[in-house]
Image (cartoon, rainbow, N blue to C red):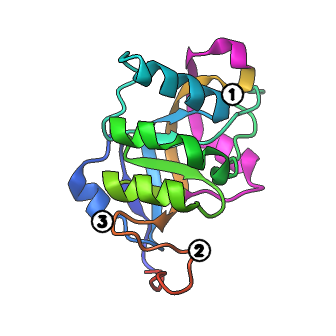
């Protein structure tokens, strides 16, 4: 098994081309944490022609609602949310330039089509490893929607955050037996 590919957002087309389904990655830099309600509010802002609270071009959005930090940590547990919850509402963010999302589990046809149209990728993080994943978050800052509590939109500064490419920009999907390549 090869070493994980180290990536730093924002992601450009060259980096996206290297993110082949099955490839392990380590992310260092800024990702944006958002769940259902934050997505709905961002979609509403986009529909009104407003800018988002972050630059979506090449961004990675992590489907997470981290718990409060303790003992000097930026956050507590920060495990991924089941991604199908965002499938019907993720399209506008991909259209705005989001290059990748992180979650857990397979994606449905709406999300796969939105990713295909935008040359975006889907990364999975290990469900049940929230404490480990939280330890990879060095800083967390609420950007918008503070009233949503743990589900507010956050800028997360991560170091060596582990994930696996589950769906690549060409549509190969680890969750679909016929399209998944051998992990390299």
Q: Nearer the viewer, mark 2 or mark 3?
A: 2
Q: Secondary structure at mark 3?
A: helix
Residue drawn at the location 65% of the way across and 53% of the way down: 84
Is 107 one of the magenta-colored residues? no
Q: Which residue is mark 1?
A: 151
| Vertical relation: 178 (above or below) 103 | below
Q: Which residue is mark 2?
A: 175
Q: Is residue 29 visible?
A: no
Pinpoint residue 63: horizontal percent, then vertical percent.
61, 42
Q: Nearer the viewer, mark 1 or mark 3?
A: 1
Pinpoint residue 184: horizontal percent, then vertical percent.
43, 80
| Vertical relation: 178 (above or below) 40 | below
In the rendered structure, which disc, 1 or 3, sits on the residue that comes first in sequence?
A: 3
Q: CA distance from mark 2 to mark 3?
A: 19 Å
Residue drawn at the location 59% of the way across and 37% of the way down: 137
Q: CA distance from mark 2 to mark 1?
A: 27 Å
In the rendered structure, which disc, 2 or 3, sits on the residue that comes first in sequence?
A: 3
Residue drawn at the location 56% of the way across and 78% of the way down: 176
In the rendered structure, which disc, 2 or 1, sits on the residue that comes first in sequence?
A: 1
User: Dot 1, crowdedness within 10 Å: few (<14), some or many (≥20)?
Assistant: many
**Quarter of the rendering containing residue 14:** bottom left
Residue drawn at the location 33% of the way across and 69% of the way down: 170
| Vertical relation: 178 (above or below) 48 | below
Q: Secondary structure at mark 2?
A: loop
* Contact flag, marks 1 and 3 (Cβ < 8 Å): no
* Contact flag, marks 2 and 1 (Cβ < 8 Å): no
State left or right for residue 78 relative to residue 107: right
Magenta range is: 124-148
User: Dot 2, crowdedness within 10 Å: few (<14), some or many (≥20)?
Assistant: some
Q: Which residue is mark 3?
A: 18
| Vertical relation: 105 (above or below) 174 | above
User: Dot 3, crowdedness within 10 Å: few (<14), some or many (≥20)?
Assistant: few
């Amino acid at each position: 098994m090869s070493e994980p590919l180290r990536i730093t957002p924002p992601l450009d087309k060259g980096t996206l081309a290297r993110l082949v389904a099955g490839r392990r990655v380590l992310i260092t830099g800024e990702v944006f944490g958002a769940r259902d309600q934050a997505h709905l509010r961002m979609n509403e802002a986009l529909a009104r022609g407003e800018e988002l609270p972050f630059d979506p071009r090449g961004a990675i959005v992590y489907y997470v609602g981290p718990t409060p930090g303790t003992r000097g940590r930026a956050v507590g547990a920060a495990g991924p949310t089941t991604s199908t919850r965002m499938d019907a509402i993720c399209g506008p963010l991909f259209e705005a330039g989001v290059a990748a999302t992180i979650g857990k589990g397979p994606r449905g046809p709406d999300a796969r089509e939105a990713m295909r149209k935008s040359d975006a990728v889907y990364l999975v993080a290990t469900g049940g490893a929230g404490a480990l994943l939280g330890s990879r978050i060095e800083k967390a800052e609420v950007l918008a929607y503070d009233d949503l509590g743990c589900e507010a939109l956050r800028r997360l500064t991560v170091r060596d955050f582990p994930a696996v490419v589950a769906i690549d920009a060409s549509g190969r999907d680890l969750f679909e037996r016929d399209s998944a390549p051998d992990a390299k």
